[in-house]
Every structure is written in C-alpha cells, then in structure tokens.
Amino acid sequence: MLAPAPQPDLAAVPDDELLDAYSIAVSTAAERLIPSVASLRVTRQVGGWTAGGAGSAVAIEPAGYLLTSAHVVAGADRGSATFVDGAELAFEVVGRDPLSDLAVIRTTGGKPPPAPLGDAGRLRVGQLVVAIGNPLGFAGTVTAGVVSALGRSLGTRDGRTSRLVENVIQTDAALNPGNSGGALADSRGRVVGINTAVAGIGLGLAVPIDAATRGIIENLIVHGRVRRAFLGIVGGTRSLSDPVAARSGRTRGLEIVQLLEPGPAASAGLRVGDIVLELDGQPIEGVGDLQRQLGGDVIGRSVDLRVDRGGEARSVSVSPVELAE
C-alpha cells in the first residue's frame, strides 16, 4: 500500500511565496492605487431639504484634481474627500459632464498622489481588472474580477438631452453603492475606467479611459464644461437596400426618425425617413458615429451631410449649433 505523500509545512513558508500570480497582481494594483482613491461626501439641496450623498474619486493630477462620476456630485458645488491615510480635504467641483457621467473636482489643503491612467482600448475580454472605491462607506475597498464584455453602451441624460456613452466596460468585479467614481484598474495598477453603475448582481459598468474621455477630462479641467454640437436629429441604424448600398459603398446608415424643431437639421430641409450616410466624408452608420463627429470644433461651421432619400442621393449643408446645457 502506497504511503501518502508528505504534506509541506505551510507555516514555515514565507507569506510572499504563498501568493499566486493572481493574488500578486491584485495586491500590487491595490497597493499602487489605494492612496489615490478618495471617499467623497457631498451635500445638496433637494426640494428645500438638505440631502447627503457619497461616492468615490480618483486623483489624476499633481495639482489636486480628482476624477469622479458626474452623478456623484450632481447638484453639489463642494464637499469633502477622505483618503486612507486619514487626510480629509475640502473639494470644489471644477466641472461636470452628465452626458459622459464624468466630473472633475479639485481638493484644497493637500495634493494626493495621482494614479496612472491607462488605455481601455487595449483591454481584452477575460482580462483581470481590479475595482477600488468606497462602497457603503467602507474606504479603500478592493474587489477583483474580469472584463466580462467590451463595447457596451450606457444611456445618459441631462435634462431633455440624451446620449450614449460608448465602449463602456462591463465587469463582474463586485460593485456596490458608493463605488461610483472609483477606479477600475488593470493588473499593473493603471486606471482604465471609472466605475459608474451597478446593473445587477455580477454586472458592473465603467466609463472607459480612452482618447475620447481624455478629451472630456481636459475640457472639464480647462473650461469647466464640454462643448458639443447639436443637429436636432433622433435616429437609429438602418440597413440599406442593395441598390443604395451598391451606389454608396455603405451597408448601413442612420435613419432620421424624428427632427427636433427648431433645430439645424430641420431648418436645412432634412426630413424624417432620410438616411444619413456621411458627415463631411466620414461614414455614419449609427448614433455613435454621429456623436463622434459633433465635437465643439464644428459648432457654427457648415458641414456636409450625404443622405439617401427614397433611393436618391442628396447632399445637404447644415450648420450645427452648440448643445445647450
């Protein structure tokens, strides 16, 4: 009869040797980022009453700028940010952009260490990610999971204006109330997203850190807001008929289902049922394509829309106006 294999004496093994690669990656990312993540406390006036709110934020600049979710500081101008070392700093809201659910705040009386920003465009489904925030008021909480999906869209609204935040990251890292505004990081401790929503058990969403959001962050720091162009079009993706596809070189376009009046598109003669194929030569296949072309640089400038109307190609000049706050 074979004797059982001798078991190692784990008590004699140094702790660092017991850590597997997964644990090392999570703990390394956590150690790097926890000092840069704050617990936010805000107060706001709601219907004559003073209400409190909480969330998280991530230091991103040596000058004391922190990045958080716009809904965390909605209706508030200032508050306090507490860090794991016990420092409690007052902050003021520098700028909010509800249509991306991002906001920038700035602390006074101290400069927390900034977290390194990564690139969400390099993420892969199944990749390890670490969420750091302050759920339910528990500061410096770390959870880990994987990227469950990429390319999700998150609907946002500011008054009567709605928009899709594109390339949202879906993760199964546990998120709870209070995590909003906290960091979603890769295994090297680089912030690749800002946690924004808990969509269900095991399903969290984060606004990506990419070229588009870096531009938003810069605008919030410099100008306190984000300028966007407005055409007054409500539409959805539509497949093109074979003749139109052959002529245009496109398979899909953006069908106009509603025109907001008064608005530039209606004034230019566009009609419900028109299918937008291009804007200034750039292909338009859906709402996301149109949003990307409507930055602040086209406000007040004539742009060329190529549309299909009942099988006939048309070119329409439209001058976008600035989207009202």
Image (cartoon, rainbow, N blue to C red):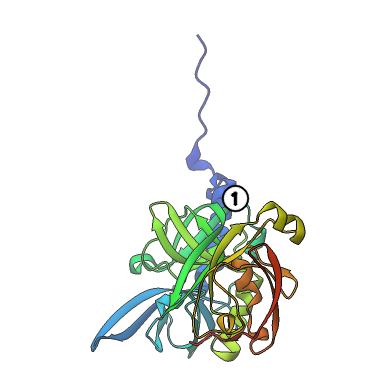
Which percent across, then down, holds residue 114?
58, 77
> In the image, what residue type sits under mark 1?
Val
The image quarter containing residue 43 is: bottom left
Q: In the drawing, does residue 134 fall left or right of residue 169?
A: left
**Residue in view at x 59 percent, y 47 percent:** 21
Q: Position of residue 110 (x, y in %)?
A: 50, 87
Q: Is mark 1 on a helix, strand or loop?
A: loop
Give neighbour class at mark 1: few <14, some 14-19, many 20+ (Cα, 10 Å): few
Question: What is the quadrant of residue 50 in the picture?
Answer: bottom left
Tell me: residue 3, above or below residue 252: above
Residue 114 against residue 24 in the figure, above or below: below
Q: Nearer the viewer, residue 235 or 207?
A: 235
The furthest residue to the top: 1
Q: Residue at x 59, y 50 (%)?
A: 125
Please say whether residue 228 is visible from this viewpoint: no
* Closer to the camera in the image, 246 or 75: 246
Identity of the residue drawn at 51% across and 15% down: 3
Q: Name the residue under label 1.
A: 125
48 sits to left or right of 209: left
